[in-house]
Image (tube, rainbow, N blue to C red):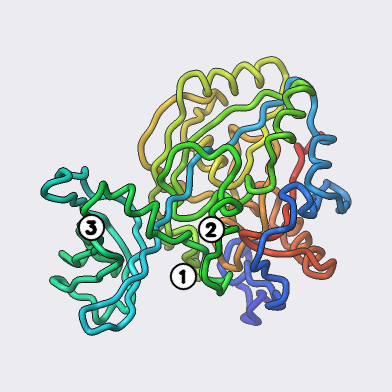
């Protein structure tokens, strides 16, 4: 039988169907606020033979001198805009990606086209306007594929300034609350640089600057990649055959010096630790069959699921992910389906906190 109770066809391996990635999670296990301190989150160590329970700062004990820790230094921008229609009814715009450069000046005002999701979708048709703040509004220009809208932002000041002043932190829907001042800091990694994500690369939220400094003191090098996290990260796989799922595309970049840092560490016998599934997707996108990371940039729609042969990553640090998600499938491809689902069962039983603001797990290299 499969996890949804349906008979399993002969020869169909567990982990090959979307329904295999269901699990029961009590609502109280969903973290709605971050831990008091970043590195005080719990850490489930998923070993080959057993699970151990640590706190996140203990991660340092798993590293060796010569290893390389790879980060995604994307920055979450205040992508959620709350305003009102001319009728006075509330409306929301969730910006996804810019569709063009900003134009205008202080005298005429500034405009920039964006792809966005809107709510209420049925009411915000082309031509409608959402007033966000004085001197800042969004006009619906057209519909786009996938139920989104092309929105033209109009502002009396540069659009980035208006977003910084009036935009909200785009907290995931399962957090189920309005954003608060604490989220400006905590729904962002301490090493975030380039703005462009509508969701945080959440495995990195547990790192502090002190923890990263201590890693380098112990001989671990730090490499940076970039992948701007899109809204597709929250979309569950609807088809029971994961192969039929249309994977979302996300912008990535790996600079030459960062690729060389990773390659040098591996050539010297060091292990590559990926901080989060976004780093895994980036590295696996740019790594050849020879195991060498090549610099590059573009968009990736790589969907990693069992079975998959990893070329670039030895150890994975990750948070706990939604059922039926592409992220959970990636973890299962890395750790093995049975071991991953066993780990999730242990995490639920032991009271771990789940999802973006939740606790963490690490899958060390198989030699450990």
Residue 44 is situated, as x and y percent measured from the top left of the image, at 80, 53
The reply to whether callout 2 and callout 3 are in contact (CB within 8 Å) is no
- Left/right placement of residue 345 relative to residue 73 reads right
Q: CA distance from mark 3 to mark 1?
A: 35 Å
Q: Which residue is mark 2?
A: 326
Say above or below: 266 vs 97: above
Screen quadrant of the N terminus: bottom right
Query: Upstream in the sequence, badge 3 or badge 1?
Result: 3
The reply to whether callout 3 and callout 1 are in contact (CB within 8 Å) is no
- The residue lying toward the viewer, choosing from 222 and 37, is 37
Residue 222 is situated, as x and y percent measured from the top left of the image, at 64, 27
Residue 271 is situated, as x and y percent measured from the top left of the image, at 71, 28
Mark nearer the viewer, 3 or 1: 3
- Left/right placement of residue 359 relative to residue 264 reads right
The residue drawn where x is 77% and y is 59% is 343
Say above or below: 322 vs 271: below
Residue 14 position by quadrant: bottom right
Q: Which residue is mark 1?
A: 239
- The residue lying toward the viewer, choosing from 324 and 95, is 95
| Mark 1 Cα shell of 10 Å, populated few (<14), some (14-19), many (≥20) | some
| Mark 3 Cα shell of 10 Å, populated few (<14), some (14-19), many (≥20) | many
Q: Which residue is mark 3?
A: 153
Query: Upstream in the sequence, badge 1 or badge 2?
Result: 1
The residue drawn where x is 59% and y is 27% is 223
Secondary element at image label 3: strand
Q: CA distance from mark 1 to mark 2?
A: 12 Å
Residue 207 is situated, as x and y percent measured from the top left of the image, at 69, 42
Q: CA distance from mark 2 to mark 3?
A: 32 Å
Say above or below: 119 vs 227: below
């Amino acid at each position: 039988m499969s996890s949804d109770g349906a008979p399993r066809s002969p020869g169909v391996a567990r982990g090959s169907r979307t329904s295999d990635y269901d699990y029961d999670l009590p609502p109280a296990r969903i973290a709605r606020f971050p831990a008091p301190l970043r590195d005080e989150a719990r850490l489930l160590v998923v070993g080959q033979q057993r699970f151990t329970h640590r706190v996140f700062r203990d991660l340092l004990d798993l590293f060796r001198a010569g290893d390389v820790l790879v980060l995604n230094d994307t920055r979450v921008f205040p992508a959620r805009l709350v305003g009102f229609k001319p009728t006075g009814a509330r409306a929301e715009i969730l910006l996804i990606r810019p569709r063009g450069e900003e134009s205008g000046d202080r005298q005429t005002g500034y405009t920039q086209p964006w792809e966005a999701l809107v709510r209420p979708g049925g009411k915000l048709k082309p031509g409608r306007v959402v007033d966000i703040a004085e001197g800042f509004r969004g006009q619906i220009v057209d519909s786009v594929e996938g139920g989104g809208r092309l929105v033209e932002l109009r502002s009396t000041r540069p659009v980035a300034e208006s977003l910084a002043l009036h935009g909200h932190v785009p907290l995931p829907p399962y957090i189920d609350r309005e954003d608060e001042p604490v989220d400006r800091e905590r729904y962002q990694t301490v090493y975030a640089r380039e703005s462009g994500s509508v969701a945080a690369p959440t495995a990195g939220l547990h790192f502090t600057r002190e923890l990263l400094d201590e890693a380098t003191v112990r001989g671990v090098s730090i490499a940076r990649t970039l992948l701007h996290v899109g809204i597709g990260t929250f979309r569950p796989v609807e088809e029971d055959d994961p192969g039929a799922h249309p994977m979302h595309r996300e912008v990535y970049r790996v600079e030459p010096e960062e690729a060389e840092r990773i390659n040098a560490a591996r050539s010297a016998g060091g292990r590559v630790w990926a901080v989060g599934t976004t780093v895994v997707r980036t590295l696996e996108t740019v790594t050849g069959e020879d195991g060498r990371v090549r610099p590059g940039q573009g968009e990736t729609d790589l969907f990693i699921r069992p079975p998959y042969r990893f070329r670039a990553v030895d150890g994975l640090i990750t948070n706990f992910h939604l059922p039926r998600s592409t992220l959970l499938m990636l973890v299962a491809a890395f750790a093995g389906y049975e071991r991953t689902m066993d780990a999730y069962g242990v995490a639920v039983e032991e009271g771990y906190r789940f999802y973006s603001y939740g606790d963490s797990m690490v899958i060390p290299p198989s030699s450990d």
